[in-house]
Amino acid sequence: MSTAGTKTERPSIVARLVLFIRQIVAELKKVVRPTRSELTTYASVVLVFVLIVMLFIGVIDLLTGTAVTRIFG
């Protein structure tokens, strides 16, 4: 008889849950929090980028609105 087609038993739901929680804790221990200066730098970069994108979209919207107004009167 061949055992290739037999099922292997899975760990219980409790054992899988405990393993999952242990893996979460292990990953959270690897997290490195930014310093205050790094956080300030990152926030500044994001704000500047958002402002640039807002200006770009605003200009495109203004130009599109003006073009539509001139075309369709």
Image (tube, helix red, strand yellow):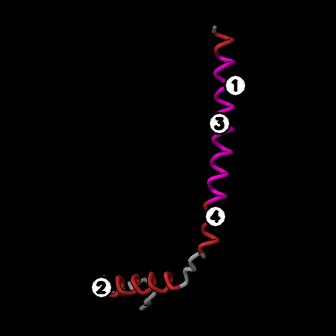
54 up-or-down from 62: above or below? below
Disc 4 packing (10 Å; few <14; some 14–19; many ≥20): few
> Mark 4 or mark 3, which has the lower sequence index?
4
Look at label 4 and name its amino acid. Answer: Tyr
Tell me what residue is drawn at x 69 percent, y 25 percent.
63
Question: Label 1 vs label 4: CA separation?
Answer: 32 Å
Question: Label 4 vs label 3: CA separation?
Answer: 23 Å
Q: Quadrant of the N terminus?
A: bottom left
> Mark 2 or mark 1, which has the lower sequence index?
2
Give the label on residue 57, or none: 3
Look at label 3 and name its amino acid. Answer: Ile
Asked if the residue at tag 3 contacts the one at tag 1, i.e. Cβ–Cβ closer than 8 Å, the answer is no
**Residue 73: image location, x then y, percent:** 63, 8
Residue at image mark 2 = 14
Bounds of the magenta span? 44-68
Residue at image mark 1 = 63
Left or right of residue 1, residue 41 in this image: right
Look at label 1 and name its amino acid. Answer: Leu
Query: In the depicted view, which residue is nearer to us: 51 or 10?
Result: 51
Instruction: State whether the magenta stretch is mostly helix, strand or loop.
Output: helix
Disc 3 packing (10 Å; few <14; some 14–19; many ≥20): few
> Mark 1 or mark 3, which has the lower sequence index?
3
Residue at image mark 4 = 42
Residue mark closest to the camera, 4 vs 3: 4
